[in-house]
Structure formats: C-alpha cells, structure tokens
Image (cartoon, rainbow, N blue to C red):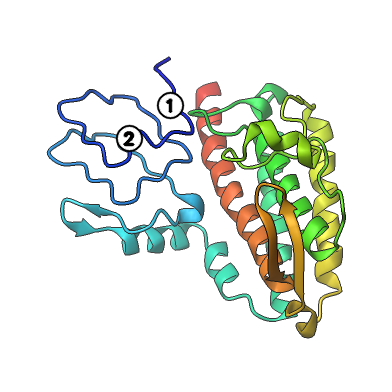
Amino acid sequence: MGTEYAGTDQFRGATFQAVDLTGATFRDCDLTGVRIVSSEIADLRVSGFNGTAGRVVVDDVDVTAYVSAELDRRHPERVRLRAVRSADDHRAMWATVERLWAETIARAERLPEPAQHERVDGDWSLVETLRHLVFAADTWVGRMILGEAVPHHRFALPPTDYPSGRAAEIGVDLAARPAYAEVLALHANRMVRARRVVADLTDAELDRVCTAELAPVWGTESHPVGECLRVLMGECCAHRRYAERDLAVIEARRD
C-alpha cells in the first residue's frame, strides 16, 4: 500500500516531473484542469459520476462527445432519463429502474454469496452499492419529498466524500456489516416506497418545491419534487452500471 493523502489541498497547482505514479488511485478528487504531458498513460482509466467526467482531451482530440454517445448506446436508460418530463414519464422511468435492478440482482444471485460482498478495484461491493441507494432514497424521497425528520436507516451508506466523523449525526453506522439478505430487503423496501410516491404523482405535484436540510454538512436546500425523483433515478442508473461492470469482473475471476 502506498501513502494515502486525504482531505488536503497541498497538491493544488503542483507539478510532477519524472515521477512514478504507477498504480496511483485518485478518488473523490478535483482534477479540473489537470494536464498529463509526454507521459506513459497505458491503461489510464477515468470514471466520472454517471458518465459526466467533464471535457476530456486526449492527444489534442476532444473525446467528450464520443464517450457520452457510447455510454448512451450501451445504456439507453440514460437517454430515457434525460427525456423525462411529465408524471407519466416519471412512472415509466421508475418502472425501467426497477426492471434493470431486478436483472442485476438476479445476475448477482447466480454467484456465491461472498461475491455480493466482493469489491473490484476498491469500488463498492454490490451490498455497499445497495446500501448507498438506500441512502439516496432516504435523502431524496424520505427527507425531501416526504419530509421525514429522521429519514436515514442505520445501514444507509453516504457518498465516499461524506465526512466519516459526522455520519452518526444522521443516524448511519459506517462500521455496520449487514448481511446481503438484510440489505436486499431494505433496498426492496425503498424501491416500493418510491414506487408509491411515483404512482401518486400529478404533473402539478412535480413542480412542488421541497425545502429541507439534507444533512448538517450540506445544509438546507430547495428542489422541486420532479428534480428529487430524477436525482434518485440518476443515482440508480449510474450505480447499476457500475455494479454490472464489477459483476462481469467477478464472474470472470470465478470462471
């Protein structure tokens, strides 16, 4: 294991020359404006959230549009989500989210249970991914739309850049190691709750503005109901893509 640098800005504007960064990992970092010049970048992998890493130029060729188009081709739910407008659109999109996740869970359950807790390249396991989607549902449906005062289940998993020392403030237990069956049932519960909210939607309700403190570290925010649901659906689609990617690696390992 190399040295870990966390919560620092000591490298802002730094220049690295003739430095060996083989195998280095940058997670939850701001790399805006970073330039890699005359360097060996074989097997360089860049992953932004939901396929939006920002403008990327390789050897003076802007590949941003190509990457976005290729992700849309491989994952057409991205295109459908961007087209969501009406209450009926939201219902249809949520049905797509549930169908896709049902397929992913069925794929995972064809593997032995340890695979559901297995990480690939340090990214979340399937169990951790489902816990994070519980967090997203508790935040955007439980807290924002339904106005629950204490929305987060203790197994919910915040984003990796959430300050670990403040997780207890919102009632989550980062040290928890729940069984796959527990997490699967919790995730199913949150999917059903969101389905009920979407089922009752009207076009007028989509514009209702919800105001709440998402978490003490984030403060109070205001968002229309439709935006809250689209954020949740975006999380579900993005993390399902990551889960499918990692399940393919796990399957290959076991084969």
First in sequence, mark 1 or 2: give its number. Answer: 1
Q: Secondary structure at mark 2?
A: loop
Q: Position of residue 63 (x, y in %)?
A: 28, 58
Report whether 13 appears left or right of 176: left
For image coordinates 12% across by 38% down, the residue present is 38
- Circle 2 packing at 10 Å, graded few (<14), some (14-19), many (20+), is few
Residue type pointed to by label 2: Phe
Frontmost residue, 22 versus 70? 22
For image coordinates 78% across by 51% down, the residue present is 138
Q: Secondary structure at mark 1?
A: loop
Q: Which quadrant holds residue 214?
A: bottom right
Whether 212 is drawn above or below 251: the answer is below
Is residue 106 visible in this depiction of the protein?
Answer: no
Q: Position of residue 254 (x, y in %)?
A: 55, 22
The residue singled out by tag 1 in the image is 5
The extreme left residue here reads 38
Q: Could you tell me if the residues under marks 1 and 2 are in contact, i.e. CB atoms within 8 Å? A: yes
Distance of label 1 from label 2 (alpha carbons)? 10 Å
Report whether 175 appears left or right of 244: right
Q: Position of residue 159 (x, y in %)?
A: 62, 42
Q: Which quadrant holds residue 243?
A: top right
The extreme top residue here reads 1
Q: In what quadrant of the picture does the N terminus appear?
A: top left
- Circle 1 packing at 10 Å, graded few (<14), some (14-19), many (20+), is few
Whether 106 is drawn above or below 180: the answer is below
The residue singled out by tag 2 in the image is 11
Frontmost residue, 232 versus 187? 232
Frontmost residue, 20 versus 216? 216
